[in-house]
Image: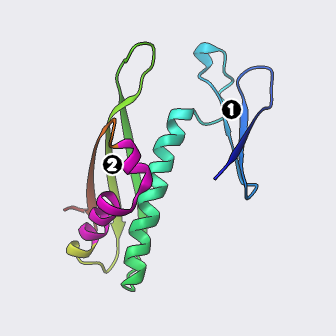
Amino acid sequence: MKIRLERINENFLMEATNESKHSMRMDANPEIGGDNMGIRPMETILMGLAGCFSIDILHILKKQKLNPTNYFVEVEGLREKVGKANPFHHIIIQIYMEGEISSEKALRAAELSFQEYCSVSKMLEKSAKIDYQVILNNIKL
């Protein structure tokens, strides 16, 4: 796995491109001179986490011939000062899905992702507490 990151303006706007030629822009906070024209690097970590476990969950459900009619997640990263850096110390995830899915299967899919499959959560859990909750058909499980 390899990416290329290229600066595209005189400030902090950069574009990261993967080997398949898919790209995204990143920028710094305006407080330090960024132009607010891209995603912050720490946000990309939360996005990667959300994408990783969501792919797992949806794949697990698909194998069981289950397909949510609606699916989205909200991920919040809480940061703390460590020297001059501000890493995440706690990540809170809410997984929302709707459809003809039993609560047991929805919970099991999330559990399998976080305990077994999601490489991003496995990496992040070494430095941050990760809590998740599944909300199925507007009911917290």
Left or right position of 13 against 52: right
Name, please, the residue furthest toward the front. Answer: 1
Q: Quadrant of residue 61?
A: bottom left
In the image, the segment drawn in magenta is: 106-124
Q: Nearer the viewer, residue 4 or 46?
A: 4
Q: What residue sits 63% from the left and 53% below the top?
A: 1
Secondary structure state at the residue bearing disc 2:
strand
Asked if residue 135 is positioned above or below residue 90 in the image, the reply reads: below
Q: Can I make out residue 28 in this image?
A: yes
- Mark before the other along the chain sequence, 2 or 1: 1
Q: Nearer the viewer, residue 44 or 98?
A: 44
- Disc 2 and disc 1: Cα gap in Å? 26 Å
Q: Which mark is residue 93?
A: 2
Q: Which mark is residue 92?
A: none
Asked if residue 105 is positioned above or below residue 141 in the image, the reply reads: below
Which residue is denoted by mark 1 in the rendering?
Answer: 37
Image coords of residue 4 (percent x, y)? 73, 42
Asked if residue 32 is positioned above or below residue 47 in the image, the reply reads: above
Image coords of residue 120 (percent x, y)? 44, 50
Name, please, the residue furthest toward the right. Answer: 9
Left or right position of 2 against 54: right
| Amino acid type at mark 1 | Met
Q: What residue sits 72% from the left and 33% below the top?
A: 14
Q: What residue sits 67% from the left and 49% below the top?
A: 2
Magenta-span inclusion, residue 47 = no
Q: Nearer the viewer, mark 2 or mark 1?
A: 2
Q: Nearer the viewer, residue 2 or 54?
A: 2
Asked if residue 73 is positioned above or below residue 91 in the image, the reply reads: below
Locate the C terminus by quadrant: bottom left
